[in-house]
C-alpha cells in the first residue's frame, strides 16, 4: 500500500506539476478568453440576470430542467468540501498567495466553463429514456470527431465515472462523518447511514428530482455561509485590507515562515491555487457541460452564459469568503494548518469569538453544518455526472446499477479511512481535465463562431425569441 501511495504521489506531482496540467489549464483559459474577447466579464451582468431573474425558458423546448436548475445542479456539485476544506488546505500549505491563484483560475476558468457548457448543449443527445445526455464525452466524440475524438471522449467518460466516487462521493461523505462526529459525538456509521438514505432518495429520482432539490437547497446554503463569513470579516474589518495585500504580494514573493507556519514558495502557491481552484469550481474538468446539457434551452450560448456564473459564484465569492476568514483571523499560521476543515473551524471560532464568546463556541458547529449541507448537495450533482458518463459508455441500462453503487459508496466513504483520498481525487481530476482541455482547444474555432453568430443577432438580449438560424 505504501508503494502504491508513493507511485500515486509521483503521478499527482507530474499531472499537477509545472509542465502538464497547470500550464494547460491556464493557457486554455487565457486562449479562450482572448478568442471570446473577455466575454466572461463583459457578459456577466446579463448572465446573472438570465440565471437568477429570468430563470426559466419555454417549458415546451427540449430539455429536462430549467436554466436555473441546471445552474443549481452545477453549483451543488462544486460548492462542497472543496470550498471549506480544500480552499483552507491551499492556504494552510501554500500560504495566502494561493487565494490569488485561485482567483486567476476562477476568472479564466469562467471562459473555460462557458465553452464547456456551449459545447455540452450543442452536441447533446437524447438517451433511451428520452432524457438529455451531454458533456465532454459527446462533444469530444462528435465535435472533434474521428478516432482521436472517440478516444478522448471515452477517456473522459471512464475517468469521470471513476472520479465521481472520489471528488463527488468519498471525500464528501468522509468529511461530513468526521466533522459531525467531532461536534455531536454520533458514530460515523450512523451519520453515513443517514447521509446515504437522504442522498439516495434524491439520486434515484434522476435529474428532475436532483434539479428540484438543488434549486431549493443551493441558494439557502450559499447565502447562509457567505452571510456568516461576512459577519466574521466585519468583526475583523481592520485586518481585511492587510489580508488582501498579503494575498497579492505573497502570490509573487512566497510566504516567509511565521509562527507555526513553515513558509511557502511561489510555485507551491500556484500549484495549490490551481489544484484547489479546479477541485472547487471544476472549470476545465468538463462537468459543467454535463449539467448544462440537461437544461431546457434552444440556445447553447444562452445556457453557456448561465453556466459560467457558477465559477464566479463558487470561486470569486464562496472560496474567497473561506480564505479571507482564515487569513484575517491569523489561524493559517498555527500548527496543524494542513487540516483544511479544522482550519476553517478555528477561523470561525476565532472570528465569531471576537464578537462574543457564545458566538465563538458556535464556530465549529457552523462549519460542521456547512460541510454537511455542501457535501450533501455535491453528492447529488456528482451522481448525475457519473451516471451520464456510464450511460455514454454502456447505454441506459448502466444507469440504475451505477446509482445504486454510488449510493452504497456514500456509506463506505463515511466509515473508511480515507487519508489519501485527496491525493487520488487530484489524480482523477487531472485525468478528466486533460482530454477535455485538448478538445476545447481543438473546438475553439467552433466555440468562437457560435458565440459571434449569437451576439450578432439583433434579438440576442430577448430570451423569448427562439433564434433558430443561430442554434443550427
Image (spheres, rainbow, N blue to C red):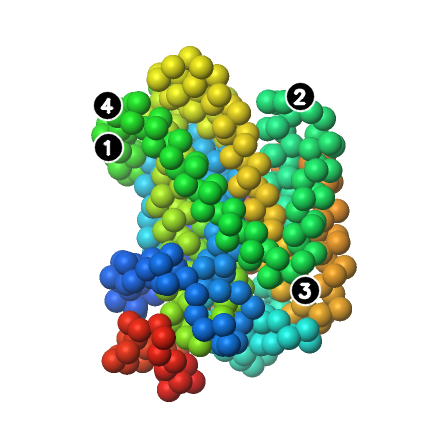
Give how far apart the Cα atoms at labels 1 and 3 are.
46 Å
Q: Considering only order in the chain, which callout, 4 or 2, is on the residue closer to the N terminus? A: 2
Task: Quickly name the residue at label 4.
Answer: 238
| Left or right of residue 167: residue 95 | left
Residue at image location 71% in from the left, 63% down from the top: 399
The numbered disc on residue 185 is 2
Q: Is residue 341 above or below residue 63?
A: above
Which percent across, then down, holds residue 150?
59, 75
The numbered disc on residue 245 is 1
Q: Looking at the rendering, in which quadrant would you find the C terminus?
A: bottom left
Q: Is residue 99 visible?
A: yes
The secondary element bearing badge 1 is classed as helix
User: How crowded is the residue under tag 2: few (<14 C-alpha within 10 Å), some, or many (20+)?
Assistant: few
Q: Are marks 1 and 4 in contact (CB under 8 Å)?
A: no
Tell me where residue 470 sits by quadrant. Answer: bottom left
Give how far apart the Cα atoms at labels 3 and 4 are.
51 Å
Amino acid at each position: 500500500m505504501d508503494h502504491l501511495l508513493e507511485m500515486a504521489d509521483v503521478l499527482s506531482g507530474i499531472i499537477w506539476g509545472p509542465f502538464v496540467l497547470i500550464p494547460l489549464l491556464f493557457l486554455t483559459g487565457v486562449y479562450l478568453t482572448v478568442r471570446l474577447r473577455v466575454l466572461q466579464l463583459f457578459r456577466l451582468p446579463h448572465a446573472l440576470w438570465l440565471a437568477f431573474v429570468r430563470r426559466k425558458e419555454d417549458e415546451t423546448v427540449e430539455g429536462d430542467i430549467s436554466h436555473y436548475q441546471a445552474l443549481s445542479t452545477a453549483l451543488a456539485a462544486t460548492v462542497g468540501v472543496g470550498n471549506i476544506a480544500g480552499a483552507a488546505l491551499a492556504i494552510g500549505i501554500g500560504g495566502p498567495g494561493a487565494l490569488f491563484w485561485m482567483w486567476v483560475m476562477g476568472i479564466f476558468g469562467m471562459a473555460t466553463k462557458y465553452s464547456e457548457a456551449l459545447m455540452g448543449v450543442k452536441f447533446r443527445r437524447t438517451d433511451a429514456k428520452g432524457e438529455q445526455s451531454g458533456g465532454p464525452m459527446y462533444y469530444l466524440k462528435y465535435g472533434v470527431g474521428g478516432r482521436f475524438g472517440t478516444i478522448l471522449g471515452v477517456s473522459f467518460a471512464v475517468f469521470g465515472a471513476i472520479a465521481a466516487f472520489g471528488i463527488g462521493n468519498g471525500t464528501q461523505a468522509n468529511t461530513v462523518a468526521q466533522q459531525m462526529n467531532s461536534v455531536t459525538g454520533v458514530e460515523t456509521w450512523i451519520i453515513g447511514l443517514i447521509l446515504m438514505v437522504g442522498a439516495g432518495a434524491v439520486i434515484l429520482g434522476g435529474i428532475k428530482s436532483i434539479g428540484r432539490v438543488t434549486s431549493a437547497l443551493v441558494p439557502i446554503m450559499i447565502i447562509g455561509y457567505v452571510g456568516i463569513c461576512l459577519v466574521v470579516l466585519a468583526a475583523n474589518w481592520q485586518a481585511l485590507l492587510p489580508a488582501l495585500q498579503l494575498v497579492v504580494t505573497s502570490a509573487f514573493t512566497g510566504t516567509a515562515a511565521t509562527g507555526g507556519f513553515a513558509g511557502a514558495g511561489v510555485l507551491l502557491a500556484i500549484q495549490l491555487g490551481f489544484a484547489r481552484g479546479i477541485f472547487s469550481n471544476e472549470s476545465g474538468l468538463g462537468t459543467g457541460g454535463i449539467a448544462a446539457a440537461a437544461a431546457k434551452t434552444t440556445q447553447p450560448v444562452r445556457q453557456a452564459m448561465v453556466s459560467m456564473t457558477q465559477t464566479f459564484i463558487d470561486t470569486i465569492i464562496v472560496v474567497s469568503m473561506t480564505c479571507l476568514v482564515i487569513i484575517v483571523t491569523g489561524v493559517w499560521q498555527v500548527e496543524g494548518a494542513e487540516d483544511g476543515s479544522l482550519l476553517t473551524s478555528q477561523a470561525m471560532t476565532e472570528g465569531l469569538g471576537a464578537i462574543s464568546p457564545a458566538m465563538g463556541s458556535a464556530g465549529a458547529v457552523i462549519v460542521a453544518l456547512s460541510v454537511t449541507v455542501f457535501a450533501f448537495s455535491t453528492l447529488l450533482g456528482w451522481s448525475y455526472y457519473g451516471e451520464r458518463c456510464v450511460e455514454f459508455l454502456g447505454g441506459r441500462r448502466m444507469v440504475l446499477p451505477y446509482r445504486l453503487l454510488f449510493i452504497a459508496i456514500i456509506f463506505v466513504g463515511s466509515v473508511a479511512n480515507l487519508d489519501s483520498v485527496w491525493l487520488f481525487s487530484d489524480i482523477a481530476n487531472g485525468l478528466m481535465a486533460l482530454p477535455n482541455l485538448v478538445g476545447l482547444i481543438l473546438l475553439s474555432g467552433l466555440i468562437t463562431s457560435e458565440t459571434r453568430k449569437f451576439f450578432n443577432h439583433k434579438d440576442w438580449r430577448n430570451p423569448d425569441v427562439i433564434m433558430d438560424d443561430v442554434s443550427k
